[in-house]
Amino acid sequence: MMEIRTPKTHKAKRVLEKRAPKLVENGKKTLILHGTKTSATLSAVLMELYRLKKGGAIKYSRRNENIRPFESGGETSLEFFSLKTDCSIFAYGSHTKKRPDNLVLGRMYDHHVYDLIEVGIENFKSLLSFSYDKKIAPHEGSKPFICFTGEGFENVPELKQLKEVLTDLFRGEVVDNLNLTGLDRAYICSAISPTKVFLTHCAIKLKKSGTIVPRIELVEVGPSMDLVIRRNRLPNEGLRKEAMKSSKDKPKKKVKNVDQNDVLGKRGRIYIPEQEVGKNPLPDKSKGVKRERREGKLKKNKEEGSASKKLKGSE
């Protein structure tokens, strides 16, 4: 039987609570891995991805001989690293004679491989090969603008899958509101052909336009590369439905006799039963009545005594 291990410390409990499923998930972390052999170009690509995703990525520099994403049994180590680091996206680089400068991008569901897409790197230019004003350099952890140009991203299945993977890779944490001044970078993806995509990273400059909406200028800051699609693997329909399933928020229980008003705020209504005053018994004040009678009798006796004395004196 499989042993179920429970956390014994508060720290372990907090870690498990962070990894537990939530209605609003945390930002997806990226796992960056090296294969058995990597070229200088591919090592530079993996390092540039790590710099772009700094704060939301984990990079392992050791070679991994047991990872073969497209082969059966070659996903075990990959799923182990995903569970260990709590990463839901991975980038795996390898270099062989048959597939030079090979980059495998994939997504995980419940720490198991969800889908895979393999691309070849061509015409790579690193961040250091671009000259620009360092004042406009994007800040670490800033929210990016992602642009996909070309009909292929809507018609070609491989490009549609690549669009989904790149969106999950670069978008970071999902937010409801965004400050326009914090939007300082953009990823431009252009479909050159059904199997080739040009990817570049640009900085955004906001300039005055005479209106409320500023004018945007793009300055290429790198890296840039061509992604040539080689192999891909889509999830089966059952796994896709399970992964896309979302829990519906339970409606809040209505509180009776309470309503909300923007002006008056929270208001409540109180129901009081009808007051039948005629049928209600009067309180018992017999002690007070007896005291008043007693005091009345004493006063009357005093008055009669004083009157009898006056009559005797007159006689």
Image (tube, rainbow, N blue to C red):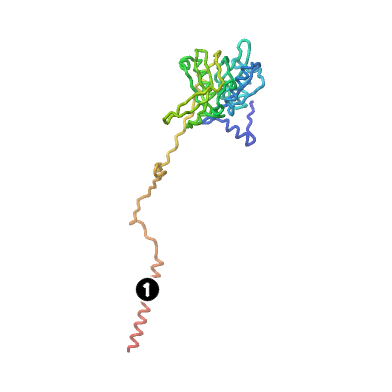
Give the quadrant of the C terminus: bottom left
Q: Residue furthest bottom?
A: 315
Mark 1 surroundings: few (<14), some (14-19) or many (≥20) residues within 10 A:
few
| Residue 265 in view, yes or no | yes
Give the quadrant of the N terminus: top right
| Apparent side of residue 256 relative to residue 314 in the rendered image (left or right) | right
Residue 225 in picture, x, y percent from top left? 56, 17
Count of picture labels: 1
Q: Residue furthest top?
A: 98
Q: Amino acid at mark 1?
A: Gly
Residue at left offset 40%, top offset 67%: 288
Residue at left offset 38%, top offset 68%: 289
Q: Residue 52 versus residue 219: which sits nearer the camera?
A: 219
| Apparent side of residue 182 relative to residue 75 in the rendered image (left or right) | left
In the image, is residue 235 above or below residue 288? Answer: above
- The quadrant where residue 141 appears: top right
In the image, is residue 98 above or below residue 53? Answer: above
Residue 262 in picture, x, y percent from top left? 40, 41
- The quadrant where residue 301 appears: bottom left
| Residue 73 in view, yes or no | no
Q: Residue 22 versus residue 57: which sits nearer the camera?
A: 57
Residue 88 in picture, x, y percent from top left? 57, 25
Assign a secondary structure to mark 1. helix
In the image, is residue 198 above or below residue 57? Answer: above
The residue pinned by badge 1 equals 296
Q: Residue 28 versus residue 284: which sits nearer the camera?
A: 28
